[in-house]
Image (tube, grey):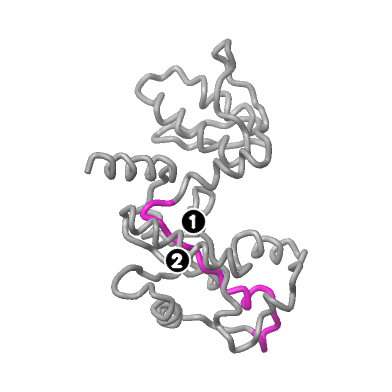
Amino acid sequence: MFVVMLLSCESKEFLNIDSLAVHAFNSAKAQRRAEHLGFHKALCLLLGWSDTAGSDGLWVKRLLPEVEASNLKNDLIIWPPVVLVHNSSIAHHGIDKRMTVSIEGLQAILRDMGFGGGKTKVSRGKPGNFSILIVTFKATFSGLQEANKLHKFYADNKRGRTELQQINDGRGLKDSNETQYVPGNEDSALYGYLGNAQDLDKLDFENKKHSVVKSKKEIQAIADANLRAD
């Protein structure tokens, strides 16, 4: 299997992902060194590999422990912060039980939850995927706090990323009564979570164009430093 890398104006083919990662780390082109290292870091993040070199300065593929890899993925969030809300009824129930959740419908739900007053903007996700709605918050620390609040709501109600993944994997949920989808009840169909780097492909073109990836820990550190300065 050949892997193609497109970086700026450069296009190359590699035999596999491993050789692509090695090339990205070892690239000697000074004018593109930062781009290659950034690509290497992102690739390692997505695949659960360590991106750091050994004591000899060489990079060798090393799998990170599952918990560490998960923590790294969750730290690198989409900015401005977004919460991806999935309508589970579209993909996992018969046609007669499917329910359409409109942008206006989700906006009304968010207002009832206290997220009104211009705190959020709701849009559709990737074209062709009608099950995802994107809730975008302000690119501020308070905006991140609001996004975390919505993320926590879904997680606490067993409608977060983990539970959605269980449904997608066909494993169901441990407590099916508590999280059962009720036809006609929008709330029972919705699952949500804070968007991180691996979710960029779920965004629509406009959101993706205006989004970057930032470290949640670094954002928190900057906010803490500003508080101490005050």
- Front residue of 33/67: it is 67
Check residue 51 for magenta coloring: no
Q: Quadrant of residue 192?
A: bottom right
Q: Report crowding for label 1: few under 14, some 14 to 19, many 20 or more residues within 10 A (C-alpha).
A: many
**The C terminus sits in image quarter:** top left
Q: Is residue 128 visible?
A: no
Question: Is 91 left, or right, of 4 in this rendering?
Answer: right
Mark 1, secondary structure of its residue: loop
**The N terminus sits in image quarter:** top right
- Which is more N-terminal, label 1 or label 2? 2
Q: Report crowding for label 2: few under 14, some 14 to 19, many 20 or more residues within 10 A (C-alpha).
A: many
Question: Is 15 left, or right, of 127 in this rendering?
Answer: right
Mark 2 vs 1: CB contact within 8 A = yes
Residue extending farthest to the top is 56
* 98 lies above or below 210: below
Residue bearing mark 2: 134
Which residue shows up at 60% across the image and 30% down it?
Answer: 50
| Dot 2 amino acid type | Ile
Which residue shows up at 38% across the image and 59% down it?
Answer: 207
Residue bearing mark 1: 195
Residue extending farthest to the left is 230
- Front residue of 13/79: it is 79
| Dot 1 amino acid type | Gly
Q: Is residue 125 visible?
A: yes
Mark 2, secondary structure of its residue: strand
The span shown in magenta is 78-97
* 28 lies above or below 156: above
Rendering coords of residue 74 (x, y %) = 53, 47
